[in-house]
Image: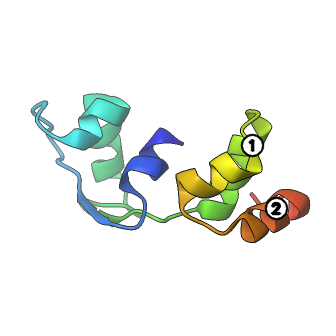
Amino acid sequence: MRFLLTFGGAELYLAADPKGRSSAEAVVGAEGVARMADHTRIGQRARVPLARAWLAVMLHWQGHSTAGIARTIRAPDVSVRRWIKEGRA
């Protein structure tokens, strides 16, 4: 979840041999970055999805309020309520 909240909606360069300098490494570690860069469907340049509906459901599951979720994922509270009700994940 932290990865999506940090990088969602933007293109991200993933080094095949990370050297400890990227912000992605701070979130998922050097091994995680290398594994993503090596993945055939991701590659070294990835456009990270927003995944707001999934994040809303997961944050709700963790006990966050609807208003807090809406502010965190930058979505209307009405959408957050709908995603939670539908259980979209």
Helix, strand or loop for disc 2: helix
Location of the C terminus by quadrant is bottom right
Observer-nearest of 67 and 89: 67
Observer-nearest of 39 and 58: 58
Q: Position of residue 31 (x, y in %)?
A: 30, 31
At label 2, the amino acid type is: Arg
Observer-nearest of 40 and 74: 74
Which residue is situated farthest in the front direction here?
67
Q: Is residue 49 above or below residue 33?
A: below
Residue at 28% across / 51% down in the picture? 37
Dot label at residue 81: 2
- The CA span between labels 2 and 1 is 10 Å
At label 1, the amino acid type is: Ser
Q: Position of residue 42 (x, y in %)?
A: 37, 61
Residue at 23% across / 51% down in the picture? 14
The reply to whether the C-beta atoms of the residues labelled 2 and 1 are less than 8 Å apart is no
Residue at 35% across / 34% down in the picture? 27
Q: Is residue 8 left or right of residue 31?
A: right
Q: Position of residue 53 (x, y in %)?
A: 68, 62
Q: Which residue is mark 1?
A: 65
Which residue is situated farthest in the right direction here?
85
Q: Splitting the image into 4 quarters, where does residue 86 fall?
A: bottom right
Dot label at residue 53: none
Q: Splitting the image into 4 quarters, where does residue 11 fall?
A: bottom left
Helix, strand or loop for disc 1: loop
Q: Is residue 31 visible?
A: no
